[in-house]
Amino acid sequence: MVRKILKDKPLVEAIFELRWELQEPTSGMKIDPHYKILIGRIYDRVKEEYPFHEQLPTATMPDEIAGYVVQHRFRESKDEWPLIQIGPGIITLNDTDGYIWADFEKRISHVLDTLFDAYPDAESNMKVSGLLLRYIDAVDFDYEKDDIFDFLKEKMKMNIEIHKMLFEKTGVSKLPLGLDLRFSFPSTKPKGAIHLRFARGKRKDADALIWETMVQSFGNDAPKVKKEITIWVKKAHELTNDWFFKMIEGELLRRF
């Protein structure tokens, strides 16, 4: 199964991120000496599909503190998705409601082709340091009425329990005002880690359970060449897709 078959998918945002190493000409300052020229070279290559350029407020940050901060966006038109973001040492592809994996994978391939073609002498000057495939999903939830821990156990295969004796005769309600649970597990296909996060949040001004599924590879675990990165993307998607459908199997899958 893939996410595109869901009629009412819970997806908030899908994100692919690639990072490359910055240079450190002086202690404590990391920069990309090719970044200024890279912005224009990338725009020249994506403007047919993403002609709308948006400069973010972060573009005014001094180079020495701007590492891995996105500063520019390229869209089809204002406020449209998907979009490409770029900053010193980082490029991302983001999509939301219109997400379909086959399309997203194709766009990732385009981003990779663009980056490796646009970066000056990429084979020598650009060393990939990190890859991330991240999905943010949400489902409406009434925290004042329902028990989030029961929901996680019964609907999402997450058996998380705070012993009831902590609440007995204390005047403390077992319905949490806030929630932020994080887990990380080592992964071999692809090599790296898979992260899960469950948090209380909002979706369209309504209380919701936000959950994130992320596959990440850093340092030596991250492939360096375009062909191997493409393979990494496929494996990362297979893993996130597998966990996503295992978690929602049952009532949530029928709802979505």
Image (cartoon, grey):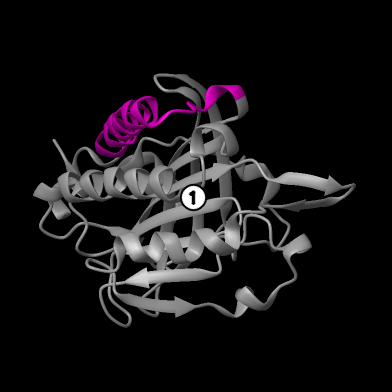
The secondary structure that dominates the magenta segment is helix
Relative placement, left or right, of 163 versus 14 is right
Q: Where's residue 138, x and y in %?
A: 35, 59
Chain part drawn in magenta: 220-246
The one of 65 and 118 positioned closer to us in this rendering: 118
Is residue 178 depicted above or below 14 in this figure?
below
Q: Where is residue 50 in the image (x, y as percent from the top left)?
A: 28, 69
User: For the residue labelled by badge 1, is the local secondary structure a helix, a strand or a loop?
Assistant: strand
Q: Residues within 10 Å of mark 1 (few under 14, many from 20)?
A: some
Tell me: 164 left or right of 53: right
Asked whether 54 falls inside the magenta stretch, the response is no
- Residue 140 seen in this snapshot: no
Point out the residue furthest to the top here.
188
Which corner quadrant holds the N terminus? top left
x 59%, y 66%: residue: 177
Residue 20 position in % (x across, y down): 58, 42
- Residue 193's place in the image compared with 35, above or below, is above
Which residue is label 1 attached to?
Answer: 198
